Image (cartoon, rainbow, N blue to C red):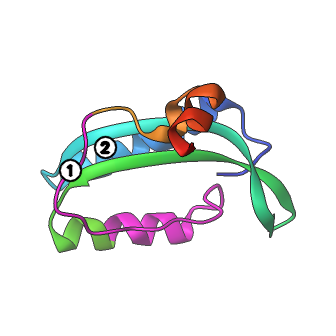
């Protein structure tokens, strides 16, 4: 999401997406806010962006509607939807402290 958005607005926007997920009777399994991070390249004049990860169990219609909302939202810079067999309930490595990440890599 855009770098000029306060974290509170990011959480509000994510709440709208979560409501959409629930509207389609889908299950939100995991939600993580990774914070304001530097982008790999400039996107729509933004050098940074708020990263949010949602893990959900949903039918194709729900995913299509969610992607449609991502496309029309001016706040969403980029998104990716991945299909996986299971979602780990533990915090992702992105939520770990930097020292823990270094130890995991070594």
Q: Which residue lies furthest to the front in this view?
A: 106
**To which quarter of the image does residue 82 belong?**
bottom left
Tell whether 15 sits left or right of 2.
left
| Mark sitting on residue 49 | none
**Is residue 19 shown in magenta?**
no
**To which quarter of the image does residue 98 belong?**
top right
Is residue 23 positioned above or below 77 on the image? Answer: above
Is residue 23 positioned above or below 6 on the image? Answer: below
Q: Residue at position x 30%, y 39% from top?
A: 30
Q: Residue at position x 41%, y 69% from top?
A: 67
Q: Are marks 1 and 2 in contact (CB under 8 Å)?
A: yes
Q: Give the range drawn in magenta.
A: 65-89
Q: Position of residue 69 (x, y in %)?
A: 45, 64
| Nearer to the camera, 5 or 81 | 81
| Main SS, magenta residues | loop
Name the element at disc 1: helix
| Residue on which disc 1 sits | 23
Name the element at disc 2: helix
Q: Where is residue 103 in the image (x, y as percent from the top left)?
A: 56, 33
- Which quadrant holds the C terminus? top right
Tell whether 78 sits left or right of 57.
right
**Is residue 82 shown in magenta?**
yes
| Nearer to the camera, 46 or 16 | 46
Q: Where is residue 80 in the image (x, y as percent from the top left)?
A: 47, 68
| Residue on which disc 2 sits | 19
Q: Residue at position x 51%, y 32% from top?
A: 95
> Callout 2: 10 Å neighbours few (<14), some, many (20+)?
few
């Amino acid at each position: 999401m855009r770098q000029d958005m306060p974290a509170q607005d990011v959480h509000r926007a994510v709440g709208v997406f979560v409501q959409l997920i629930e509207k389609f009777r889908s299950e939100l399994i995991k939600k993580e806010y990774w914070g304001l991070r530097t982008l790999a390249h400039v996107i729509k004049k933004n050098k940074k962006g708020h990263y949010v990860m949602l893990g959900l169990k949903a039918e194709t219609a729900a995913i299509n509607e969610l992607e449609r909302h991502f496309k029309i939202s001016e706040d969403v810079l980029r998104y990716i939807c991945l299909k996986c067999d299971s979602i780990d309930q533990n915090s992702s490595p992105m939520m770990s402290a930097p020292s823990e990440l270094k130890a995991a890599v070594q």
